[in-house]
Amino acid sequence: MAVKAINGIPLPLRRKSPSHKKSIVSQSLTSYFGLLVGVVAFLWALFSFVQDYPIGFSHHASGLVDWDHRRLAVRRAFEESWKAYAEHAWGNDRYHPASQKGSQMSPSGLGWIIVDSLDTMMVMNLTEPLAEARKWLHRSLSYDQDQDVNTFETTIRMLGGLLSAHYLSSHLPFVSSRRDAVYLTKAIDLADRLLAAYESRSGIPYASIHLSRKKGIVSHADGGASSTAEASTVQLEMKYLSHLTNNDTYWRKAETVMSILDANRAKDGLVPIFVHPDTGKFTTSEIRLGSRGDSYYEYLIKQYLQTSGDERIYYTMWQEALVGIQKHLITTTKNSQLRFVAELPQGIGGPLSPKMDHLVCFLPGSIALGATGGYTLTKARSLPDWSPEKEQEIQLARDLMKTCWGMYAVTATGLAPEIAWFNAEKKDLQPEPGSRQRSSAKDSLSSWKNDYIVKPLDAHNLQRPGTVESLFMMWRITEDSLYREWGWKMFGSFEKHTKLGQGKGYSSLDDVNQIPPPARDSMESFWLAETLKYMYLLFSPSDYLPLEDIVFNTEAHVLPRFKPKWRTGWERSHN
Ligand SMILES: *[C@@H]1O[C@H](CO)[C@@H](O)[C@H](O)[C@H]1NC(C)=O
Ligand SMILES: *[C@@H]1O[C@H](CO)[C@@H](O)[C@H](O)[C@H]1NC(C)=O
């Protein structure tokens, strides 16, 4: 890095030496001394620049980096996490790495960790642990249990994990299980239980189901309302299952949800975060892109991509929402003019709250994905439907990516808190549509630190994937190695602060601003399913699982794009 940077900048000591006569020897001594002083001064300047300037410097590094080496480091982190789980909590739904114990969410376990991890092991070619996991699934896992489960979590983690394992087991060259029926058989059994959730008066799924009784259960909280994101984040899984089984039952149940939500005619495509399964109506006006809102938007663009662009309706809805987000939610910070996504606790027209969940960090990647459809930016720009609007979307994705990276960069551990608050530019927080950074904005780490506020109650880190997921998408699409470098720094912080000694594995943290940070004694299943998978893919060659052939569900499970066997079963009642 330093070498290239030095070559690129004219060093100050190259100016002409003074004209008065000197002996050859003293002249060259003087210039050697000058050279030395210059180099030291330059390196010092470069060092302070790098210290203070969290962006940009790594552009120079890319050519010299061994990405395979980094990719293997991520694989090792997975292996160590898995080994700890297998030794201390095998077959359990949760793993507590500090106390080295497992615990169950149902009497005999539902395989939350094992099923969620299957496809990561396939992607990383971890054949032996995969064989063990498959054996457990085949012999020990039954969904016929006297147990309530959350409809959404079960769909995205379990059904999604099984479907991804099914897909990859016949599409990754080195996964040995040819035409292995075990994953699909389990998926069908589980989905038939999940269908009970859709037996509500409106068709909006109940928050939970009872597995063995195959019965939907209304939410015990929130006045019986279901979370909007949960109801609208089951479609990729149910539709792919229909595609595989040639049975449109799952497809129709899931797509009906979209028509019911859309019939509410949410202003500018921004949906409130609760919807009632009896009425199909929103029960609040609160809007946010974080918890309970996030993956509604993610699945709009991904549903469009999953069926190969055949279902235009979801692209229209995505575009409408994206315009709404820019009009009502995007605003900037005071010191560095970082753009961020605020919340509307009282809906459109109410005040903005300068708060952004780490969960929102799926958004930059999804925006870039929506703009190019998964192609590289270079290729997408050469296609006839490229437009200035799409160029702007890429800029928005870049800006939000930077803000998400900042959540890591400003903390003591280099790891993001669950929620960040911001010093917003204006008191009234009116967003300025399309506002760009002022040239006077200070884009340095110390200035960033004055923009982010981490409150004690929000300071925990749950090993969440959103930011690395977006970094992966941004790298694949823009081909800017800056995003890979940020990912590598992030991985370094996870290694340094979340890895517990003595083979215990990796833990969530209680406080990202405390050194050493207190461990939370939980290793989330999405650490294995998502965070490490995206990290691994970020450092993998870009033709490995090409972005234009697949979609990732919201739990990073890999599903193929396909041509739909059925037409979209609904139309918008308005435009
Ligand atoms: C995958 O792993 C197996 C053995 O564990 C090995 O034989 C094979 O070469 C690996 N394949 C790739 C593509 O790395
Ligand atoms: C499609 O799947 C549903 C749910 O399992 C089942 O009730 C129905 O009989 C299936 N239809 C066909 C034609 O197999």
Image (cartoon, rainbow, N blue to C red):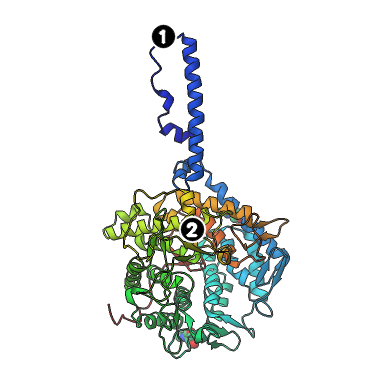
The local secondary structure at tag 2 comes to strand
Instruction: Give me the residue at 62% from left, 57% from top.
Output: 514
Q: Nearer the viewer, residue 121 or 175?
A: 121
Of the residues shown, which amino acid type is indicated by label 2? Tyr
Secondary structure at badge 1 equals: loop
Instruction: Give the x, y percent position of residue 374.
Output: 39, 60
Farthest front residue in view: 427
Q: Where is residue 304 shown, x and y percent of the image?
A: 37, 70
Q: Residues within 10 Å of mark 1 (few under 14, many from 20)?
A: few
The residue beneath circle 2 is 452
Q: 232 or 251, which lies in front?
A: 232
Residue at numbered disc 1: 21
Residue at x 34%, y 69% (from the top left corner) = 324
Residue 292 vertical placement versus 178 (above, below):
below
Residue kind at label 1, given as amino acid type: Lys
Return the residue nearer the eye: 266 or 108.
266
When asked about the image quadrant of residue 140, the answer is bottom right
Q: Position of residue 95 (x, y in %)?
A: 67, 68
